[in-house]
Amino acid sequence: MKIALMDSGIGLLAAAAAVRRLRPDADLVLSSDPDGMPWGPRTTEDLTARALAVAEAAAAHRPDALIVACNTASVHALPTIRARLEPAVPVIGTVPAIKPAAAGVGPVAIWATPATTGSPYQRDLIERFARDVDVTEVPCPGLADAVQYADEKAIDETIAAAAALTPRDVRAVVLGCTHYELVAERIRAAVQQPQLPPLALHGSAGAVAAQALRRIGALPSTDADGGATPGLTVLLSGRAEPLPREALTYAEGRVLAAVTPAL
């Protein structure tokens, strides 16, 4: 089995690690675009062209499925990617986990990039799944870039800035950018109020990993295939490269590097 994942940067690590946990035997293809990131400020046409190139680079390795592990690309480029690759390669998009967050108890905050915050796409999800819930949209300028480059000082500063915009009584935070899942516990620590029950964080990695397996008719399995080491192919703007050094800053990146060759 081979599962490909794409993103502008290392935000795809969370979903890749989730796939690895569900299927330790699966080969992974990680395709990102360090030459063109960030994608958020680009026009829809430019972003779509770059996302499609990243998707096609992954598809050239003949995966069984492709996960678009990027909220921005899913918003703007998913129909184009599906039109190009399906039905030969099932394509799974990433949607902010607003629905499960709204099913909980209490107010919800949605942390997302400035481009996504307040967008018609996000507002539509809120209207559909959280109409009767107190929802606060929290823009997080600079957080995805800080995570991408493993800039510890910038991560602390951008999380603190977003936490300051988050109502103190929220009971759940939706991580509306895949990069944010790599620093989920730091977000929890910044938002959690000592007098309140544990804060719920809602990411998308586990859901998209499970959906990818469903799309190809595969079941989760804790056993690697015959003990063989699964493969990992890393594509940076189409070039085969080692896993980026910054990826090893995060537990999800170390999980991948620990059990697979980083080429």
Image: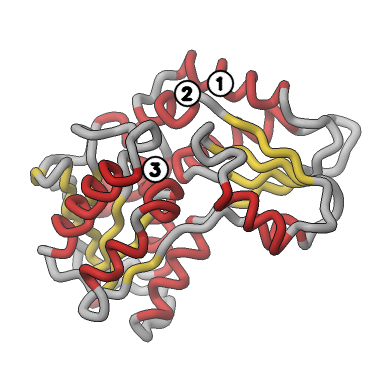
Q: Is residue 106 above or below residue 129?
A: above
Q: Residues within 10 Å of mark 2 (few under 14, many from 20)?
A: some
Question: Which residue appears at 23% of the width and 34% of the height?
Answer: 36
Considering the numbered disc 2 on the image, is that residue within a helix, a strand or a loop? loop
Question: Which residue appears at 41% of the width and 19% of the height?
Answer: 151
Residues tagged 1 and 2 counted as in contact (Cβ below 8 A): yes
The residue lying toward the viewer, choosing from 126 and 244, is 126
Task: First in sequence, mark 1 or 2: give its number.
Answer: 2
Give the spatial CA distance, label 1 vs label 3.
16 Å
* Disc number lying in front (3 or 2): 2
- Residue 225 horizontal/vertical position (percent): 25, 76
Q: Is residue 31 above or below residue 149?
A: below
Q: Which residue is mark 2?
A: 142
Considering the numbered disc 1 on the image, is that residue within a helix, a strand or a loop? helix
Q: Which residue is mark 3?
A: 11
Residue 206 visible? The answer is yes
Give the spatial CA distance, label 1 vs label 2.
6 Å
Task: First in sequence, mark 3 or 2: give its number.
Answer: 3
Q: How is the image coloured?
A: secondary structure
